[in-house]
Image (spheres, rainbow, N blue to C red):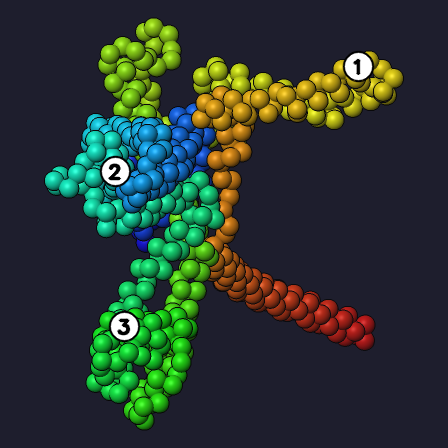
Amino acid sequence: TNVSECLKIYLAAEPKPSTDFLTALQDLPDWLQDVAVVTTHVRNILNEKIVQRFPTFILMCDLIIYLVLVVFFYLSSREEIKARFRKEDENEDAGSSEASGENLIIVLFLGATYFLLRELVQIISLWSLGSVSSWFFDPYNWLDVLVIVLIYYFSILIATGFAEDEKSNFSIPDSSLRSFAATTHFILWLAVISYMRTIMVDFAIFYGGLIYVIKRLGAFLLALVVLLLMFAQIFYFLAFESDRCKGSKIENPNYDESDDKYAHCTPVRSIIKVFTMMMGEIGSETRYNDSTTAKIMYALYAIIIVILLSNVLIAIVTESYEVIQNDRAASVFWGNRLSFVAEMDAISYGIKKRLRIVGWYREGGVTGAPTQMQEGPYTISGDLYDNSKKEDPSKRYFYNLWKSLVQLFDQDMFRGESEALSPRNIEFWCIFLFQAATILVLIPLWILAGLCTFGILWPPQIRELIFVQKETTISRADLEKQKLEQLKEIQTNLKCLKVDMKKEMESDREDMIRMKSEVESTQNDVMSDLQQVRELMTTLLEMGRK
């Protein structure tokens, strides 16, 4: 459309990647954001932003704290369930169990506090940018809020003892404790899955494909529910008050609810049975031998539900997932990365703004230098840490130091001295010792220090290696678009060639006509000259006779 083309032209001018620019990209409609995030300029901006120290720090903190919450909530909920349902005569080690449980609760409380502070800082930063509404329309923010509420609720109730207090309105009953633990684990793992989509292309494609498939299955699921309810009622009424289902547990000693032949004796069990039959758990078909109608309905169920709808479901899922995998792979991943980068940029902007107000932060530059510059194209080189950029000296120091360590293994560096370097020379063993110390001690310690500091002490090359996504797979839609553009180009060239050939033929025709006229003119001149010669010869002959 014209809007998409205008957006591409604007992004081709390489505008400066300010916080407002990223926030505006995030606020675009989905169909327009898909166009923006796959452009080269936006990809370069996202790659450069995500390898900075602050986004790397937040990425690693999120991953570690998510994993800590999952593990410690598993341990704390397990201890709470054991303590709640432990018999009275098995409480000799209750003291140590309570002490370990308190330590687990403290870790959970700290993890939830980290995410709470992060969300609050994000809201304040977006409010200062005038775009706080984008926070409320992001479903992943509400997922984080749900994680915070559930962890706080569990931690506070367990720490205060209200969870077991039956008089408290906020207590967790014994019958609901297992369900609460299972639901919270489900929400925590959903948050982990949501995190993974921002750093891995394949996972982003899988996650986007899953959401897209669920959206596409709306009409199919509605039709499936209607058909399952229909067959469940049909089988229930065919078995209602029959000899197979007649009688209660007291009157019929052979009655067993787990027996497959009583599958349709109650409405609820009939619904469950038709659902499990669709999954392949048919059981014994002899329960449909009571009547011809039951056999016919069972055959219709097998044809409609088991054969037709199951294959339709497979076709819909396959087609929908291929759309994400082939047509929207790049837009899905870069859209997820845009959300995270815009969030981190807004938080960083808000923190710097408040530190600048209190005088604790000042942009680099000499006193009296201008604080603003004229807007112009923002060029990003192939190297994210090119020497032409003005950046933190510590970043440049780490970059050069890592580059120097890697150059120790560059064979071209010692090529001119290859004849002098041999095991018989001391220089050879010095270089060998330096290389061994680098690969066995320095590099592992540096990587470990970066892990312990959540990526802050890592050199830029490692952050770039982990988080920079160079290129995503070309989608099928892009391939079709390229083919269509090539065909259009060929058609245009053919039309131009046809016009050129037509012009050349017309020009050649005019040249032929002109040459023909010139030949005719020359012929007439020659004939005229010959006629004059003939007349002259005739005159000479007559004069000679006289």
In the displayed structure, would residue 440 be above or below residue 119?
A: above
Residue 215 in view: yes
Query: Mark 2 or mark 1, which has the lower sequence index?
Result: 2
Q: Kindly identify which numbered label has been placed on residue 154.
A: 2
Assign a secondary structure to mark 1.
helix
Q: CA distance from mark 3 to mark 2?
A: 35 Å
Question: In the picture, which quadrant includes the N terminus?
Answer: bottom left
> Which residue is the site of mark 1?
427
Q: Is residue 317 left or right of residue 424?
A: left
Residue drawn at (58%, 64%) of the image: 508
Rendered image quadrant of residue 260: bottom left
Residue 177 in picture, x, y percent from top left: 26, 46
Residue 346 in view: no
- Residue type (three-letter) at the residue carrying disc 1: Glu
Q: Is residue 148 left or right of residue 50?
A: left
> Which residue is the site of mark 3?
269
Question: In the picture, which quadrant includes the C terminus?
Answer: bottom right
